[in-house]
């Protein structure tokens, strides 16, 4: 299978300083973006934190790295050698 | 006969671009606008509202920024770690190195788990990608790549492309021949991920953009502009119906994007240096970031702000990579001081330090079923911790 040619090349180039002829367009874009962000519906940190905590505690039991699982169940942990009595 | 005389500035700094040049004397709503001829033409072409100048736009953006900060501040009624005081303190973890995978000839830059929870694929500066069976330590296959970068500092020989290599269990198949070039940027590709459907590929690049590609045709479906410097990392939101992803870069910002519209929905700027890695919290409502400023930070998407900073005076080296444990309670972070710090996400404290690597940790990844952590390092090895 040959390498497929791709039909689009991104042509933007990053420059840290916008040229002065674009500064109005640039400033307008920033104002637009800020307006979008200002319209975002936020919730209180107390509510967000409570939800994060709930998620953690609900899933804690099934988190092997957190709880540690039996060596016999964990394929990575070396099983204890058998002793012959 | 005209008797009136009035002063007109015919040469001086232009009100718009600031360059000293001959000025056109225009009056908009009786206000003198002293622009040079170039800016007058630009104004006409860009259909500026009457009186809209660079200054007025700057003033507007400053006041919007202030308003945003106020709005975010109003909702900051409590800190996450305060709410987390109710949660039990974690007992010490018994996580140790269980496997060391040797086989790469140079720095291991990147690693990821296969959905089957036992295979891993890693890539190295030696130009090879190796698929490992993590249980048996066997190398399943080795693929030579023309280049394969992932380190933001490794600029040599980066070919700006992202290729897809289908993996199969048949050892005899010549996988390199099936390699397909999908994405092409104008600078190095720093990160990539398949979308939920596996038919599309999302990439981030040193050219400051992210892009969504169709794997089959290689066509560019959407591009994401907004970062003002190299984008170093991206992560797809975990939801099945999710259409958002987060990216972080050298402009110290983490941006959340809508994949369909290309719109930048949210932006977070609190790091003090390059963001090397971003990773979603398992519920998809938050994400963490690792930065060269030696901190990892935790951002809640619904509260639209940073809610935790994971830092210690003794931790002074940059963090290269982060990943959450299955429940999201633990955050594993790999650092340039060769260690992995394990943080309690809710309380903000460090739970454990994992020693073992002999050089920088470049990537950490928790397995899909959460049983193990894999770390890749510049010491040419990978370690599996459990």
Image (cartoon, coloured by chain):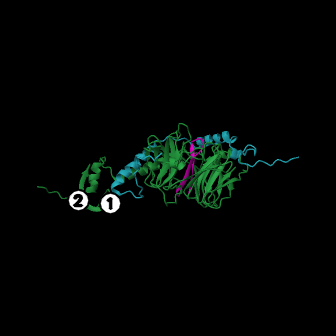
Point out which mark residue B203 bears.
none
Residue B236 % position (x, y): 53, 44
Residue A58 seen = yes
- Spot the residue most to the front: B172
Quadrant location of the N terminus of chain B? bottom left
Both marks 2 and 1 on one chain: yes
Is residue B226 shown left or right of residue B137? left
Residue depicted at x 76% and y 44%: A72
Confirm whether the magenta stretch covers residue B68: no
Residue B162 % position (x, y): 49, 50
Q: Quadrant of residue B314?
A: bottom right
Q: Quick one: B334 or B59, which is closer to the camera?
A: B334
**Which chain corresponds to the colour green?**
B
Q: Main secondary structure of the magenta part?
A: strand
Task: Decide which of tag 2 and tag 1 comes sooner along the chain.
Answer: 2
The local secondary structure at tag 2 comes to loop
Is residue B196 shown left or right of residue B370? left
Residue B296 seen = no
| Span of residues in magenta | B273-291
Q: Nearer the viewer, mark 2 or mark 1?
A: 1
**Which chain corresponds to the colour cyan?**
A
Write down the residue under mark 1.
B18
How crowded is the residue under tag 2: few (<14 C-alpha within 10 Å), some, or many (20+)?
A: few
Residue depicted at x 68% and y 45%: B371
Residue depicted at x 68% and y 43%: A63
Residue depicted at x 80% and y 49%: A81
Write down the residue under mark 2.
B8
Q: Chain of mark 1?
A: B
Q: Quick one: A31 or B134, which is closer to the camera?
A: B134
Q: CA distance from mark 2 to mark 1?
A: 17 Å
């Amino acid at each position: 299978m040959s390498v497929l040619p791709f039909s689009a090349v991104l042509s933007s180039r990053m420059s840290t300083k916008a040229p002065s002829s674009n500064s109005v367009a640039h400033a307008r874009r920033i104002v637009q973006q800020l307006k979008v962000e200002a319209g975002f519906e936020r919730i209180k940190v107390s509510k967000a934190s409570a939800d994060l905590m709930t998620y953690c505690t609900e899933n804690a039991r099934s988190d092997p790295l957190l709880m540690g699982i039996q060596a016999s169940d964990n394929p990575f942990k070396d099983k204890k050698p058998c002793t012959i009595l | 006969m005209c008797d009136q005389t009035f002063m007109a500035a015919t040469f001086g700094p232009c009100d718009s671009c600031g360059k000293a040049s001959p000025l056109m004397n225009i009056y908009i709503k009786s206000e003198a606008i002293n622009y040079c001829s170039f800016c007058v033409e630009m104004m006409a072409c860009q259909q500026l509202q009457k009186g809209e100048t660079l200054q007025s736009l700057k003033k507007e953006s400053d006041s919007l920024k202030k308003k945003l900060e106020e709005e975010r501040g109003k909702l900051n009624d409590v800190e996450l770690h305060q709410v987390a005081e109710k949660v039990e303190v974690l007992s010490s973890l018994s996580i140790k190195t269980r496997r060391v995978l040797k086989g790469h000839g140079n720095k291991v830059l990147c690693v990821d788990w296969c959905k089957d929870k036992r295979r891993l694929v890693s890539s190295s500066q030696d130009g090879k990608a190796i698929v490992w069976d993590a249980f048996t330590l066997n190398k399943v296959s080795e693929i030579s790549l023309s280049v394969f970068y992932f380190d933001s500092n490794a600029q040599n020989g980066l070919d700006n492309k992202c290729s897809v290599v289908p993996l199969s269990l048949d050892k005899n198949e010549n996988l390199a021949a099936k390699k397909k070039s999908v994405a092409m940027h104008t600078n190095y590709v720093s990160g990539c991920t398949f979308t939920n459907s596996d038919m599309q590929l999302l990439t981030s690049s040193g050219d400051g953009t992210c892009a969504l590609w169709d794997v089959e045709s290689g066509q560019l479906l959407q591009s994401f502009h907004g970062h003002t410097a190299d984008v170093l990392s991206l992560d797809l939101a975990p939801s099945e119906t999710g259409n958002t992803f987060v990216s972080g870069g050298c402009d110290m910002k983490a941006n959340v994007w809508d994949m369909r519209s290309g719109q930048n929905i949210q932006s977070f700027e609190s790091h003090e240096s390059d963001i090397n890695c971003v990773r979603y919290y398992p519920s998809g409502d938050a994400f963490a970031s690792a930065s060269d400023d030696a901190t990892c930070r935790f951002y809640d998407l619904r509260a639209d702000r940073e809610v935790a900073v994971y830092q210690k005076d003794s931790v002074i080296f940059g963090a290269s990579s982060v990943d959450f444990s299955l429940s999201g309670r633990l955050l594993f972070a790999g650092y340039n001081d060769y260690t992995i710090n394990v943080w309690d996400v809710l309380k903000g404290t460090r739970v454990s330090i994992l020693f073992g690597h002999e050089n920088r940790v470049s990537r950490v990844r928790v397995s899909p079923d959460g049983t193990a952590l894999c770390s890749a390092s510049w010491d040419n090895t990978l370690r599996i911790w459990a």
